[in-house]
Amino acid sequence: MTVIIDTGCGNFASVQFALKRLGCNAILSDDPSTILSADRLILPGVGSAQAAMQKLRERQLLPLLAQIEQPLLGICLGMQLLGEYSQEGDTALTGLLPCSSQRLETAGHPLPHMGWNQLTVSDHPLFHGINNGDYVYFVHSYGVPVGELTLASSDYGQPFSAAIGRDNLMGLQFHPERSSAVGAKILQNFLELQG
């Protein structure tokens, strides 16, 4: 069972539809027992880090996130929420991963970083069958710098983490549900991960 965590600030319909095209009927839920009994979890997020954290507190999801042991995939803002801190609104995040989100230094490129950009990938199972130079779709103004948690990177004026992860926790800065065949393959890889 795959559960999309209902944070109240996610792009649920498009993620759900992308998974359905792969034969996965994901459940949208903020129920603790449903979340903890899932085989894998997806944490989507759109909007500001501050507003998203407020929604997580209102829904009493923060203590629950710390208990998750199965594979969890954060998407876009959902990836950033896995970290400790965001410059956006000077916001403390979930602290599940030791990283922070910073305003992108774009060397004069416009913000937000919006549109297709290339990946440089690692050999992490999420990127099985994905090649360096493959394109995915981004919409963001903040990002995680490249570091020890980086599973894939992209460049927009300077390199940034396109994906991060450690153990059961993974995050994608881009939108796999809007990234055509490459995004579908990454989602399929996630669905095939063993907890």
Image: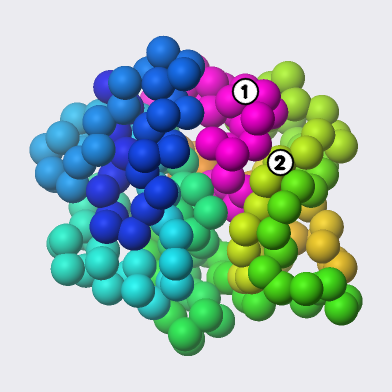
Side (left or right) of 44 relative to 29: right
Residue 95 seen in this snapshot: no
Q: Which residue is mark 2?
A: 136
Place of residue 105 in the rendered image (x, y in percent of width and height, measured from the top left): 78, 76
- Identify the amino acid type marked 2: Val
The amino acid type found where label 1 is placed reads Lys
Tell me: residue 120, above or below residue 104: above
Is 103 drawn above or below residue 20 in the view shown?
below
How much space separates mark 1 and mark 2, taking CA atoms?
11 Å
What residue is rendered at 49% in x and 75% in y? 85
Residue 41 in sight from this viewpoint: yes
Q: At 13% across and 44% down in the image, what residue appears?
A: 31
For mark 1, what is the residue? 185
Q: Quadrant of the C terminus?
A: top left
| Dominant secondary structure, magenta | helix
- Residue drawn at the location 62% of the way across and 48% of the way down: 174
| Residue 16 location (% of width, % of height) | 38, 32
